[in-house]
Amino acid sequence: MTLHRRNFLAATGVALAATAPGLRAQPVDKPEKPQLTLAVGGKNLLYYLPLTIAEQLGYFKAEGLEVKIVDFSGGSQALRALVGGSADVVSGAFEHTINMQPKGQKLRAVVLMGRAPQIVLGINPKTMPNFKTVADLKGRKIGVTAPGSSTNVMANFVLAKAGLKPGDVSFIGVGAGAGAVAALRSGQIDAMANLDPVISLLTRGNELKIVSDTRIVAEADKVFGGPMPSACLYLPQSFIDKHPRTVQALATAIVRANQWIQKAGPGDIIKTVPESYLLGDRAVYLDAFLAARGALSPDGLFPAAGAETARRALASIDPEIAKATIDLKAVFTDDFAKAALVRFPIK
């Protein structure tokens, strides 16, 4: 449901912000629900860097929010927290708004963090020294952040192009940090679908051979046949309807973080992210940041064709999505990001 323009402007205070430049750095109106619980799966990943920047630089607080961030091992678990009622909002993969619609869950993405999935599928050269094509993965163990997460979806998509079904391999949840690195190094898995900084750490030591790399926007567009939105903030439509100012505050904080990242230098990043994110190697993290920055959204806006690309990708591996009628206009909105850009225009 698209927000009525007059009510939306009144709820977010956009008119006030546009006519009072002195208030630009202040929340334009108090959020209805200032204390929130946000679920995320793998907060240390570059995939979610805007979330960390918004938290570390106080952008949520500047909008009148106190956000409790609960970190899970994968996005599917963060989704379950939202559906189960223990979280108000998820920082997660855009495609969850689509695959939950046929299940009766009306979820909507309100601000974009990633314009490409940033997921890399690679093989373990130790256990697969003779690897030639994706079809060689049949019968093998593939590590993903968590079963059902976006890393699992991406792996399924690449496998399907090679004629393999999800049941032709074994998916193992390895998380998004040191556990994933250890699983590959110890030979517990033959391949991995994961994100940075895990990928950069393993490829730097030639411990992972890349098969498909969606950190590169052009390659992601080629893999999925169009723009594929990735990390975003999504919430139940009922929450958005009831708490529009709260949602606006969340979106504004992320838009500011997106803009900061585009201008940040390597030193700025190192000083801002927690030390634990670096996996013991600052150089690797900086390599990962530089590799991922192009895939991060500069403005929080969703690509017009993105929802259809995501639906088509999901339909190719999920019969339920393929036969379902999906209302793509209901799974995202640019209203909140556009309002944030009025207060904080890109310079």
Image: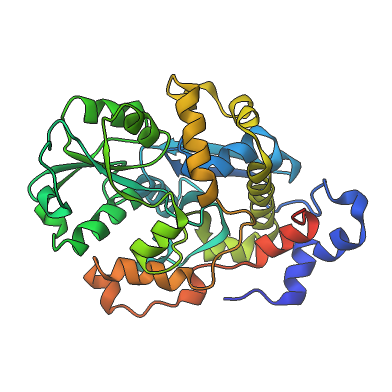
Query: Considering the image in quadrants, where does the N terminus appear?
Result: bottom right
Nearer the observer, 189 or 212 = 212
In the rendered image of this protein, does residue 330 appear above or below residue 300? below
Describe residue 53's horizontal placement relative to residue 295 as left or right. Answer: right
Q: Measured from the top left, where is residue 77 in percent x and y?
A: 36, 45
Q: Is residue 318 visible?
A: yes
Farthest residue to the top: give it: 280
Q: Is residue 101 visible?
A: no
From this view, report whether residue 53 is shown above or below residue 156: above
User: What is the basis of the colouring in this image?
Assistant: rainbow
221 or 309: nearer the viewer: 221
| Residue at (70, 41) in percent of width and height | 59
- The quadrant holding residue 279 is top left
Relative placement, left or right, of 56 versus 192 is right
Query: Between 62 and 51, which is closer to the camera in this rendering?
Result: 51
**Identity of the residue drawn at 23% across and 29% down:** 183
On the image, which quarter does residue 130 sit in? top left
| 173 sits left or right of 311 in the view | left
The answer to which of 287 and 332 lies nearer the viewer is 287
- Name which residue lies at 91% across and 54% down: 21
Q: Position of residue 161 (x, y in %)?
A: 21, 63
Quadrant of the image occupied by residue 293? top right
Answer with left or right where residue 192 lies relative to residue 135: right
- The location of residue 175, given as percent across then percent down, is 32, 35
Residue 262 on image: x %, y %: 64, 45
